[in-house]
Amino acid sequence: MNAPDEHGRDLVETVLGPHGGGLENGGLRAALLQRTRRTLRRRRRRRRLGAVAALLTCYLAGAATAETWWPWRPLAPAAAHKEGATVGEPTSVAGTQDSTEPKPGREAPLPEGAGPPPATAKVSPFEVRRRAGDRFLREPAQLALAVRSYTNALRVASVEERAISPERDSWLLMALKESRLKERNHGNLDH
Amino acid sequence: MIADERVTREQVLRAAVLAGDESAWQALYDETFEALYGYVLWRSGGRKDRADEVVQECWLTAVRRIRRFDPQRGRFLDWLRGIAANLVRNQLRRESKRRSREVLSDSGSPGSATDGSPLEDRERGSRIALALAALPERQEAVLRAKYLEGRSVAEIVAAWNQTPKAIESLLARARDEFRALYVGSAGDDDRARDPAALGWQLQRQPRREP
């Protein structure tokens, strides 16, 4: 059957041999390259959009978490102003507890993380300012703010709170309390 | 090119294409376009209209599915050929169904030319395509090496790492099988246009995964 005949090997070679003139496909080649490149471009764009969407999702998730779980949030400046608080005052305290108290003037801003305890616990205005002062005292280069917080605390302190307490008071607060006591004593002597 | 170098190069190009690099894609495209086109034209029995259609679909499929291409398993061109072979087979099936509908409705000539080529050439091209699609994969490969790529038996022996006798035997069987299929499909006009006669050959060869 392998011998050449009418439908023999010649037929196979003729039928399956190279097809002349079939490779004039410059137009098809260029057009097809463009189409496939467009597909690649779309894929690249989708990848970039995906990355941007992922970043945006992370950012929004972080923002939502902060909004939901952050234990203390300062009031908006307008709200703080409405409550009669001064600029830089720890607004949540001013808004909830200081409305009937004497305005202490310009107070030190609360340090980060030195927010008041949950609303259920009752803390005196002195205690809030004292804690703020403690926080400032622990941070480097915040001594002036600590002094201002302690001064404000002493301004709103009760008689018991004005007494020196070595267990609770920091060295700075004790020094301020002592100097106040001396001032008062001197004032009494003068009178 | 050494096999390892080829694998590394194609892996790098594949990764670049997946990242959206157009120049990497163009490198693969330019290297393989002519060879793929020649293969598809050969598989389509020299019918340029069919070859154009298959080549377009093949490249669009390739760019969408390049993630599935594994250079460790074979060359990029071989992967493309696998896709093209499946597409040719699908095209023949579609044509078979279309002819079946035409015969049933008896509307129009089943072999009417749409691309201006003579009817006989179109019929001949269809018969070649059907016979090649019905051949076992190994026989189709040896015929491709011999007649499309123009390799000698000695070159095929070296490339396939086989004995000359094995290759000659395979080539002889492939020729005989092809001849039988080709001549067998050239009965009278009714048989040549009978969808069942066109379709039975395709049933013999299972679909190959690229």
Image: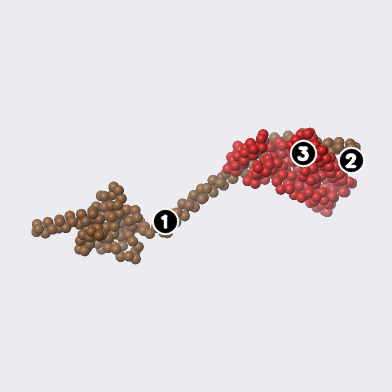
Chain colours: A brown, B red
- Residue named by callout 1: A66
Q: Residue A136, position in %: x, y?
A: 29, 52
In the image, residue B170 sits, relative to residue B204, either above or below, namely above
Say whether marks 2 and 1 touch (CB < 8 Å). Answer: no
Query: Which chain letter matches label 3?
Result: B
Describe residue A26's horizontal placement relative to residue A64 as left or right. Answer: right
Report helix, strand or loop for mark 3. loop
- For residue B48, what is the image quadrant? top right
In the image, residue B141 sits, relative to residue A103, either above or below, namely above
Residue located 87% across and 45% down the image: B184
- For residue A117, what is the image quadrant? bottom left
Nearest the viewer among A171 and A150 is: A171
Query: Which chain letter matches label 2?
Result: A
Describe residue B86's horizontal placement relative to residue B172 as left or right. Answer: left
Q: Residue A83, position in %: x, y?
A: 30, 60
Residue located 62% across and 38% down the image: B8
Label ID, residue B162: 3
Report helix, strand or loop for mark 1. helix
- Residue named by callout 2: A1
